[in-house]
Amino acid sequence: MTRRTRDFAVLVLTTGTVMLALAFTGSLGLIEALTAMFVIGSIAAAYYVGSAAMQVPTAPVPSVEMSGNDQVPIADLLSALPLPAFEVCQDQQRIIAYNQPAAAFLRLGQRRSAPPRASVIIRAPALLTAIETCFNAGAQGAAEIEMEIGPEEQWRAHIRPIRSSGNLLVVLEDLTPVKRAARARADFLANASHELRTPLTAISGFIETMRGPAREDKDSWDRFLGIMAGETERMSRLIADLLSLSRIESAEHVQPTSREYFSDIVLNSVDALQPLAGEKGVELVFDEPAFLPPVTANRDELIQVVENLVSNAIKYSRGGHTITIRCGVAPDGFAARTEAAQVWPESERMTLLQTSNRSAIHDPTVWMRVEDQGPGIEREHLPRLGERFYRADQSRGGKITGTGLGLAIVKHIMAHHRGGFAVETVMGQGSAFGVWLPAAREI
C-alpha cells in the first residue's frame, strides 16, 4: 500500500507541475491547465482505487479428526505426504491446500490473491469429471482413476472425501515407471521371440540332419558343429544386447547423478578395443583433448556407447584403415553437434537424436566423434539408423555379423543422458558417428 501511495503522489505532482509550468509560460491557459489537472487527477484516483488487491476472507484451516481431542491441520498432513496431494473445497471447487509435490505437478505459483479453481489449474478432463462426480455423491464420493499426462506419463488419482469439512482430498500416484517397465518387458519378449527364431531354426535343422541323413557322415559333423557354434554365439550376443536395451529403457526417465570424466572413459575403452583392431589390421587413433569438464553420467553406459561405436567402425573397416576418435567441449549443444557430426563439407547427414532446446542453448556440452574409412552409408538408410534390428549391410560391406542393436543402444543411452546422436557419411570415403551430452554443472 505504501508503494502504491507513493506512485500515485508522484504521478499527480508531476502532472500538476508540468501543467502549472505551461500556464506560467503562456503556452497553456490557466483554466485549461486546471481542467487538465482535474481530469488527470480523477483518472489517477480511479486507477488507484480500482487497482487495490481484492481482500479475500481466509477460512480457518480445516483439520483431520483424530482419536480423542487431537486434530491435525490438513496443511500439515499434506506436507508430510511424499506424493502430490491437494484439497478441493465445495465452494466453486477451489484448490485451498496443497503440498510441494502437488505445486510442482500443477505448476502453482506462490502469489495468488485467491485459491485457484480446479478447472483452471488441472488439465486432465478425466480428473475434473471424477472430482465433480465425487462432490455430487456426497460423503460416499470416493474414486480412483488413471489418466495420461502427455504421451509418456501416466498417473493414478485417489479421491477421498474429508468428513469434517465435506471437501475432497486428491492424492496423485506416478505410474510412469511401472508402465514403462511393463512396456519394456513386453518389447523384450516380442523382440527376443522374433530374433531368436532364426538361429534356433538353423540349429534344430542341423541337429535333425546329423541325427538323420548325415548320421554316418562324420566328416560333415565338424562343419555342422561350427555353424551351430556360430549361431549359439549369435544368440548369446542377442540376448545380452536385448537385456541391456531393456534395462536402459526401464531407467531412461531417471537422470544419472555420478560425475565422470569423459576423456578417461574414452581412453580406457579405446585401449580395451586395441586387440580387436589389431586382429583386423586397423589402427585406432585417439586425439586426446587437453581438458574436458566432467559430465553427469552413468559410467558403464558411456563405456557401452564408446565401445559400440568404435567396434562398429572396426567391423566396417578393412586392413590398413585408420579409425579416429576425437573429443572436445562446445559452448552449447548446437555447436557440439557441428563438431561431432558436421565436419565433412560434402557429406550426407542425419541427426538421430536431438537434445532439448533448453540444454542445447544454455549448457556447455562435451562431444565425441568416431570417424572411419569404410564404404559409407547410402542416404536412404540414414533415417532408420538407431532402430532395433535395422541393418544397412548392403551399403556397409555386406557380410557383417551383428545383432542390429548396437546403434539402438547408443541412442537410448544418449536419451538417458539428455544428449544427442548424429551421423554423417560420404560414399567411398567413410562414416562418422557423433554423440554429445551436457557438461556437469559446477557444484
Image (tube, helix red, strand yellow):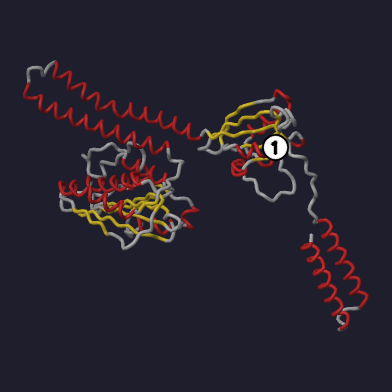
Reply above or below: 380 against 362. above
Which residue is the extreme one toward the top?
A: 212
Rendered residue at 22%/40% (across/down): 400
Residue found at x 26% / y 27%? 198
- Residue 302 picture location, percent across and down: 34, 47
Residue 106: image quadrant is: top right
357 left or right of 60 in image: left
Callout count: 1
Left or right, 320 with reference to 138 = left
The quarter of the picture where residue 78 lies is top right
Residue 411, percent from left and from top: 37, 44
Name the residue carrying label 1.
Answer: 73
- Residue at coordinates 57% horizontally, 30% vertically from top-left? 146
- Does residue 10 sit above or below 437 in this rendering? below
Q: Dot 1, how many residues are within 10 Å of its Cα: few (below 14), some (14-19), or many (20+)? A: few
Looking at the picture, tell me which residue is in the foreground, 410 or 104: 104
**As drawn, which residue projects farthest toward the bottom?**
25
Depicted 414 relative to depicted 5: above or below? above
- Residue 62 or 39: which is nearer the viewer? 62
Q: What element carries label 1?
A: strand
Residue 32 location, x and y as percent?
A: 91, 74
Q: Quadrant of the N terminus?
A: bottom right
Amino acid type of the residue that numbered disc 1 sits on in the rendered structure: Pro
Looking at this rendering, what residue extends furthest in the right direction?
31
Image location of residue 105, percent across then percent down:
59, 42
* Left-right relation of 39 to 277: right
